[in-house]
Amino acid sequence: MEIINDIEQLSELDKVVQCMEAGNPVIIPTDTNYNLACFPESSEAIDKIFRYKKRPKNKPLSLFFLKPEDWRKYGVCENDEVMQLLIENFWPGPLNIIVNKKDSSYDYMLNGMDSIALGCISNPTWRTFMQALRRPVAITSANISGTVDDMLVTEEIAIEQMGTSVEYFIKSQKPITTSKSSTIVIVTKKGVKILREGDIDRETLNRALIKRGYCVEQ
């Protein structure tokens, strides 16, 4: 595995992109965990991710993109007002939002599910990388499934568990300061339901939603 310390160098970026275009995942930083990432249209790379992680096929990957407003390209939400509140208050940031998928474009990474988990994060290294890619990525944490459920996937864990499988590791140029994995919510008619609570907690979500008469459902 080669560690990329400066993704802004064109030669380094080109290597990583070529690797991904050849059907391989790479490791990238986020606001929380280090993640395996690939192009969401690449069935070859997606299969490798599931194999490397020993991840059950019924668990889909998430789709991350650069611009918050781009969510409409990939998802359909039953409550646009709640979606807009979440975006205004928490994106870019460590919040994954589950909505209905827009179409069948990413069915392979979703394993046929009707919903899709969307993310837009603030990590500067990740955003530099995404600006160069100009396309979304499919991601999941860079660890063997079930091994780090109660902790973040750090640089050390990602390298230890994925170092022999993945060719490139993009190192975050700034320290990752979150203490938990990203919060995951489903948008509902009344507000949201929390599937996983991270640093953006129930109280923080409620404060943002209650302004418009919505809430975090029990």
Image (spheres, grey):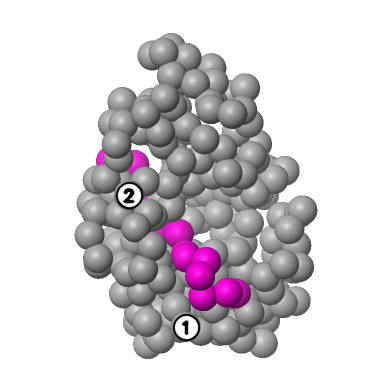
Crowding near pointer 1: few (<14 within 10 Å), some, many (20+)? some
In space, the residues marked 2 and 1 are separated at their CA atoms by: 23 Å
Q: Image quarter for residue 46? A: bottom left
Residue at (47, 65) in percent of width and height: 60
Residue at (62, 69) in percent of width and height: 142
Q: Is residue 65 magenta?
A: yes
Q: SS of the residue at dot 2?
A: strand
Measured from the top left, where is residue 139 in percent x and y?
Answer: 48, 64
Measured from the top left, where is residue 184 in percent x and y?
Answer: 54, 44
Q: Which residues are magenta?
A: 55-70
Q: Is residue 123 above or below residue 212?
A: below
Three-letter code for the amino acid on which mark 2 is drawn:
Asn
The dot on residue 100 is: 2
> Dominant secondary structure of the magenta stretch?
loop
The dot on residue 47 is: 1
Image quadrant for the N terminus?
Answer: bottom right
Measured from the top left, where is residue 2 in percent x and y?
Answer: 60, 81
